[in-house]
Amino acid sequence: MVQRYFAYGSNMNPARVRARGLLVERAEGARLAGFRLQFDKTSARHPDVGHANLVYAPDSVVEGVLYWLTSSEEILKMDPFESAPVNYSREVVQVVAGSGSITTWTYFANPAVRRAGLKPPRSYLQHLLAGEPYLSHGYLEMLRRLECVEDR
């Protein structure tokens, strides 16, 4: 059973993951090859802003936080926050971390809730930036340069 969760969006913020009740043994930085980060998942409350999603891109890499869960059932606690399976589907992927190639859960936005041209709200982006200890300098700088929508 898969007992890890790769977060690439707002759940890169360890405080947010704790507040959502996930029991985590440890966390480390990880990279998912063959995908790029895109903010094309519409927000339920603000349909003009985007939340993080993974899009297939063979020459790209997404960085994130790999959470080692205390049990394989812990991931079920995240499903309601991701509105899975309606807004996001939970899938198994292979990431590379300091401990090697790891099988892990992550979430992909479903086509029905995706729209091109969206930008993340600044407050949402702050959750991604909270993953700083787990990200490379270059990836962190890319996140800092993202154009955001100012919070209302």
Image (cartoon, rainbow, N blue to C red):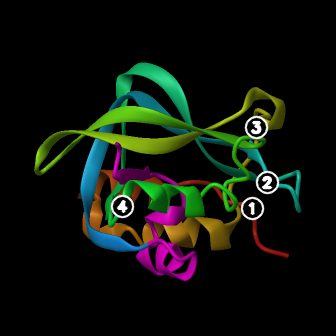
Residue under pointer 4: 71
Residue receiving disc 1:
149
Percent x, y of residue 90: 56, 40
Displayed quadrant of residue 59: top left
Q: What amino acid type should be assigned to the residue bearing mark 2?
A: Val
The residues bearing labels 4 and 1 have C-alpha atoms spaced at a distance of: 37 Å
Mark 3 = which residue? 117
Which mark, residue 49? 2
> How far is disc 3 from disc 4 in space, using C-alphas?
38 Å
> Which residue is pictured at 40% across the width and 53% down the height?
5
Q: Position of residue 123 (x, y in %)?
A: 65, 73
User: Residue at the location (75% across, 69% down)?
Assistant: 150
Q: Secondary structure at mark 4?
A: loop
Evaluate whether residue 19 shows in this view.
Answer: yes
Quarter occupied by the N terminus: top left
Please tell me whether mark 3 or mark 2 is closer to you in this view. Answer: 2
- Check whether the beta carbons of the residues at disc 2 and disc 4 lie within 8 A of each other: no
Distance Cα–Cα, label 2 vs label 4: 34 Å
Q: Choose the circle earlier in sequence order: 3 or 4.
A: 4
Magenta range: 1-22
28 relative to 152, above or below: above
Lower position in the chain sequence, tag 3 or tag 1: 3
Discs 4/1, front: 4
Question: What amino acid is labelled 4 in the image?
Answer: Ser
- In space, the residues marked 3 and 1 are separated at their CA atoms by 12 Å
